[in-house]
Amino acid sequence: MVKISDKCYVHLNGKAIGYVSNPQAYVKEVRTARRKGLISGEVNVVYMEKLNEIHINTDRGRARKPYIIVEEGKSRFTKELAEKLEKKEIDFAYLIRSGIVEFLDAEEEENAVVAMTESEVNGDTTHLEVDPVSIFGFTVNTAPYPEANNVARHLMFASYIKQAQGLYATNFNLRFESRAYILFYPQAPLVSTSTYEALKLSRHASGQNFVVALSTFYGYNMQDAVVLNKAAVDRGLARSMFYKTYSDEERRYPGGQKDVFKIPPATTEGYLGEHAYSKLSDDGVIEPEMQVEEGDVLIGKVAPPRFLEESIGAGGLEEKTRDDSTTLKPGEGGVVDDVIFTESPGATRIVKVRVRSLRIPEAGDKFGSRHGQKGVVALIVPHEDMPFTENGVVPDLLLNPHGIPSRMTFGHLLETLAGKASAMKGTRTDGTAFTQTGSDRLDEYGKIIEAHGFDKYGEEVLYDGVTGRPFKAKLFTGVVYYNRLHHMVSNKMQVRSRGTVQILTHQPTEGKARLGGLRFGEMERDVLVAYGASLLLKERMLDQSDKATVLICKECGSIGYRDYAKRINICPLCNSNNLVEVEISYAFKLLLDEIKSLHIRPQVGIEE
Amino acid sequence: MAKQESKYGVQAGEPVGVIAAQSVGEPGTQMVLRTFHFAGIAASIATSGLPRIIELLDAKKTPSTPISKIYLNESSKKSFAKADEVAKKISEIEMRSITRRIVEDFSKGKILVMLNAQAMQAADLTAGHAAARLKKDLGLDAKVGKHGNIVIGTHTKNLKEVRAIAVKLTKSIVNGIEGAGRAMVAQDQKTQEFYVESAGSNIEPMMEIDGVDSSRIYTNDIFEMYRVFGIEAARTTLALELKKTLEEQEISVNERHIALIADAMTSSGTIQSIGRHGLVGKKESVFARAAFEETVKHLINAAAFGQIDYMRGVTENILVGKQIPLGTGSVKLSIKREEGKKKK
């Protein structure tokens, strides 16, 4: 008889299906059967000692990872097998089939004792990592020396690399991506990793090898800012092209009406003026290689009126139309790259216009290395003002050394040194995780650099380009692979002094697309209140926002109006002519109106 | 006017409230992530950080972890033994924590309470002591029976009544002061004096105990301070608690900002929370209240009762677009009309 406490419940995909009295033996049996191929290799089983429960998982959606099976202190993946694999006599699938490699899910990993390397294997070991780098993911493994960096920086790198500009596809000139960025001179990184090579990422690289000096520059690279060399930028460093696609469709409407691509006639409602359509060809669409700027129409289109009455009304023979052209928004511009006509499944015509524009690095553009170190260009310095080395080498980028210690991105420094060694030797360096110890790497790169007559720690005397004097300290210089990220000022910059307001509230609009202002919010308001700057506050909240002048009746406190024909002010409620002009916010007027709509009569008292 | 200003160091029209709010609010944003630190002695498990600040500003009726400090008078504070004696008198022990089983004998109308010897020993209690306390508190006929059990005669054989007494028993207290929690002797780091710290708060009966210095007794329950000592004591306690909580988080805020908040919360003579049920909800201006929370409620009430907004606050003046009556806006310039008219 089995006591309740001795029962070990077995859960299949989270559902209890029975119990066993000897869990260890049971779990072992399941695993043996799986390795022999008697049951599916996708079954994972775990014995949870603390709960005294067995979980068997066969459902979908579990992340699983391959491990080499180790038995009695011996790896099942023998030297003979390794040789056969090398000769391609066997493949990975064979290893899985023959019970040499198995996949574990997150739960079964709890039961495993995994050795990182073969030398770590002992009597307790149950599995061996296929490769130590597999403790990182694919993205992290494309960066060199991930084992030398802080984890948080890995996560940051993984998100930056997705924003890097490069050669995302070699047929980019045939594609109509809504937004695309193509780097002019993509380079394979000097310091690469096995994962990077296996993924063949150098075929569509997304960065360039920058000569970097860890140096300040008259305060222009404080707080993660970077300084670029003007000469390098002029030679095409990080230069890229920005492609944007605009598209439109000739939609059909119920009632047989249809949109038409054409240059809208002047009678069209919402006509933008002859000048706006001047670049369109006869078919109503712009031609390739045409220079375009903000406000220009790319696709001319006329649409039927929004409401039925409009087309019937007025009694005219000519059918009224509405302009629905596609226009370049403020701040946009460039050259029309290509235009295509296609058809939708509903047999309506579609036009796609791709506009390209050059993006030369400028102050405000964002760059990042492969160690989660990002920075915004603050200054582009003329070549002659940049610091230079004894040999006349001028760095492409100046990185502030204060950004290194607190972030603990030691990998960045290792890459700087390895990049320098690679550049001197003329070969690429492998920076795969765990292949060498940090000090071995330092020695190796140091020796190469020393052999070429430089300081083995990568430090060099730099001369200030402005004064010509050498800096007191030697500066760490080397080569680092940098990505140009797609956040660029020219796509984001916006200014406004005055402009459009919202119809409802008469307050300025919000957002770049609507040429809006920046919100002066509640907390900003509190700051002015705390400072006691009452007039500045009034200017912000009223004069530069929704100032409205209304006439208020002195007799009854309601809002009146001016009769311009009779030249008198009238209160419609009490017929009094005793009204005063008062400046209030339109929002308050709106509030009074809304209260009135609830059949409540607000009255405004005037004090003089 | 000039004399008054130099006396106080703050100029007339200075928005001290907004400055206080910002001065506490800004470092407060850094607090959120740094709660739930140090494990340690029972006393330090008290709610701290942002949850405690919220508790204080919301004027919660009871703190989630009440703690009281009972200081002793001259004759008792030097001796650990005397302090421990006081602690024993305070330390609350519930019946259920020392009983093993309660057996009701309905035929005889008796209740047999079987005690847990281990728990009794740990609490330093005897069956006689417990029985005496039950007799005193509940007026029951409690005696010590065989095997150190307590036998209670109920003088009734009514099933319901016996059961009711048994239920009452489990909830009753055999030692200490109700609500006082566990009390322990602690030593002041500076003065080396002994005092009693308890994980509960019921200071009124505590003050009656021999050896307690009732003028120095302290609890972190602001409402209890208010009930026992009055609004001024509540204000001081509130300010002290706020200050202590901020200091624990290594946030330095000038005392005056905290004092102002405590002043504002207690200025009406009772403790008001900061929020729609308290200070903000009692603002004079309809617009200011409507702009904060429950817009419709305030507007409807204003309409129903024909309320007038005198436009004396900040919010309502910004709403309509007037200059605010603070800072540079607190000064008014007026011209005597009569003189102007005379010249005409």
Image (tube, rainbow, N blue to C red):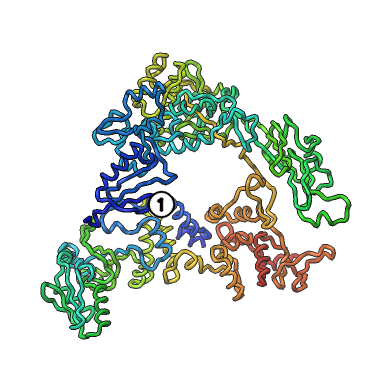
Residue in front for this viewpoint, B190 or B248? B248
Up/down of A40 relative to B333, above or below: above
Q: Amino acid at mark 1?
A: Met
Residue A348: x and y in percent read 73, 43
The percent position of residue A69, horizontal first and vertical second, equals 32, 34
Q: Is residue A20 left or right of residue A324?
A: left
Residue A275 place in picture, x, y as percent: 80, 38
Q: Can the viewer see residue A531 in this picture?
A: no
| Residue A160 relative to residue B344: left or right | left
Q: Which quarter shows the C terminus of chain A? A: bottom right
Residue drawn at x 21%, y 81% as measured from the top left: B106
Position above or below: A98 against A523? above
Q: Which residue is mark 1?
A: B31
The chain holding disc 1 is B
A210 in relation to B92, above or below: above
Image vertical order of residue A532 relative to residue B148, above or below = above
Along the line of sight, which residue is nearer the eye, A162 or B128?
A162
Describe the element under mark 1 as helix, strand or loop.
loop
Q: Quadrant of residue B87?
A: bottom left
* Nearer the observer, A456 or B287: A456
Q: Residues within 10 Å of mark 1 (few under 14, many from 20)?
A: some
**Residue nearest the observer in this picture, B291 or A310:** A310
Answer with the quarter of the image where residue A259 lies: top right
Image-based side of B34 in relation to B119, left or right = right
Task: State whether residue A20 appears in this view.
Answer: yes
The residue positioned 60% from the left and 37% from the top of the image is: A489
